[in-house]
């Protein structure tokens, strides 16, 4: 029918308050969807007590209000915000090297080194000079590492970065063990350090390092279970008993278990985590976005590494 169409609509910016009922992370769109009941909104919108869904992406601003905050929740937020800096960045090519330290406050170049390599036609002298160059870089890196407790990232173009990584493995295992990644950038020296920051390499490396740490913890649980050791437990019932006795050194809980638990189970789980924290235990939330998290889910989503062996017949 002519003249008849859908009523016009427009977006109206407003600040809403939701009493959260469900949370869902859409991996395909990288958005967090929060569903709940509107408890605060401008009166003219007429949406109080109605259901609404917020869609949040990276960079969105939201205020979270809870009756109380568990320590592990606060620590998780702090880790996400700080990305576990500092990080030592070694950027080198065949001409120069710079060692910088990345912190929240910015990047500081600690040391710059020139290689002074002979031309490619003088292969024997060049190989000898390269060995001296890598030795000098590793000695300088060791000095920086003494004062900065952080992971090491080696960056650079072509093969120089690979040569340094190999040199450290063969000659400085004390440093090689702290190398979190070897990545490509277009140049060495200070320019390479700043390029690594600018293109977001640090964020990716640190997220990967956290994943590796989570995987190691889950594998340790499985190894202890496989050896029938008494210093490990899994499942909410067993872990609850160990938490109450103060035996838990580290408790692992999957993010899916935290998000998907029914209200009664969620309250029980929160209480277990609070008990662990009150007895100087560590709470680690394991992502189900990797294999470690999925393995933990198969154990009921909760496991604990204990301070000492427990005899279940007691």
Image: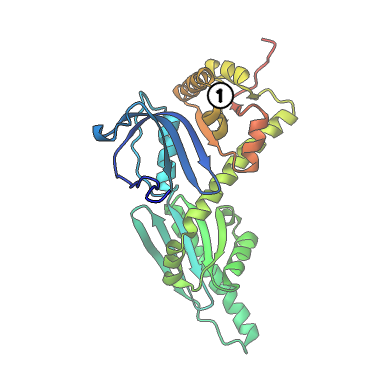
> Which quarter of the figure has residue 165?
bottom right
What's the residue at 47%, 61% (across, down)?
89
Q: Is residue 303 above or below residue 159?
A: above
> Please, which residue is most extreme toward the right here?
227
- Residue at image mark 1: 248
- Circle 1 sits in a helix, a strand or a loop, which is it? strand
In this rendering, position of residue 96 left or right of residue 291:
left
> Where residue 93 sits: x, y (%)?
52, 74
What's the residue at 50%, 48% (across, down)?
30
Of the pair 126 and 300, the residue shown nearer to us: 300
> Where residue 169 sits: x, y (%)?
63, 60
Q: Residues within 10 Å of mark 1 (few under 14, many from 20)?
A: many
Count all numbered tags in the image, as a single digit.
1
Q: Is residue 86 above or below residue 194?
A: above
On the rendered image, what quadrant is the C terminus found in?
Answer: top right
What's the residue at 74%, 25% (across, down)?
228
Q: Is residue 314 above or below residue 71?
A: above
Of the pair 230 and 273, the residue shown nearer to us: 273
> Where residue 32 sits: x, y (%)?
47, 41
> Please, which residue is most extreme toward the top here?
314
> Where residue 13 sits: x, y (%)?
29, 44
* Image colouring: rainbow
> Which quarter of the figure has residue 35?
top left
Of the pair 53 and 180, the residue shown nearer to us: 53
In this rendering, position of residue 295 left or right of residue 151:
right
> Please, which residue is most extreme toward the front here?
1
């Amino acid at each position: 029918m002519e003249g008849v169409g859908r009523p016009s609509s427009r977006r109206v910016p407003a600040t809403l308050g939701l009493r959260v009922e469900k949370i869902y992370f859409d991996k395909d769109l990288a958005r967090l969807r929060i569903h709940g009941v509107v408890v605060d909104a401008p009166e003219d919108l007429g949406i109080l007590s109605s259901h609404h869904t917020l869609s949040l992406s990276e960079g969105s601003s939201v205020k979270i209000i809870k009756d109380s905050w568990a320590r592990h929740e606060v620590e998780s937020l702090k880790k996400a915000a700080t990305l576990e800096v500092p990080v030592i960045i070694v950027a080198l090519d065949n001409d120069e090297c710079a060692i910088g330290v990345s912190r929240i406050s910015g990047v500081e170049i600690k040391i710059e080194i020139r290689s002074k390599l002979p031309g490619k036609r003088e292969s024997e002298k060049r190989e000898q000079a390269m060995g001296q160059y890598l030795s000098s870089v590793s000695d300088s890196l060791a000095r920086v590492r003494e004062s900065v407790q952080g992971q090491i990232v080696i960056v650079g173009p072509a093969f120089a970065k690979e040569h340094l990584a190999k040199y450290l493995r063969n000659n400085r295992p004390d440093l090689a063990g702290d190398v979190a990644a070897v990545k490509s950038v277009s140049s060495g020296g200070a320019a390479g350090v700043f390029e690594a920051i600018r293109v977001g390499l640090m964020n990716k490396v640190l997220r990967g390092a956290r994943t590796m740490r989570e995987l190691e913890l889950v594998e340790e649980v499985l190894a202890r279970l496989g050896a029938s050791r008494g210093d490990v437990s899994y499942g909410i019932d067993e872990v609850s008993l160990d938490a109450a006795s103060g035996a838990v050194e580290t408790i692992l809980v999957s993010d899916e278990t935290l998000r998907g638990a029914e209200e009664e189970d969620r309250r029980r789980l929160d209480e277990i985590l609070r008990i662990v924290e009150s007895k100087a235990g560590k709470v680690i939330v394991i992502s189900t976005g990797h294999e470690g998290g999925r393995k933990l889910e198969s154990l009921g989503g909760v496991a604990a590494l204990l301070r000492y062996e427990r005899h279940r017949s007691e």
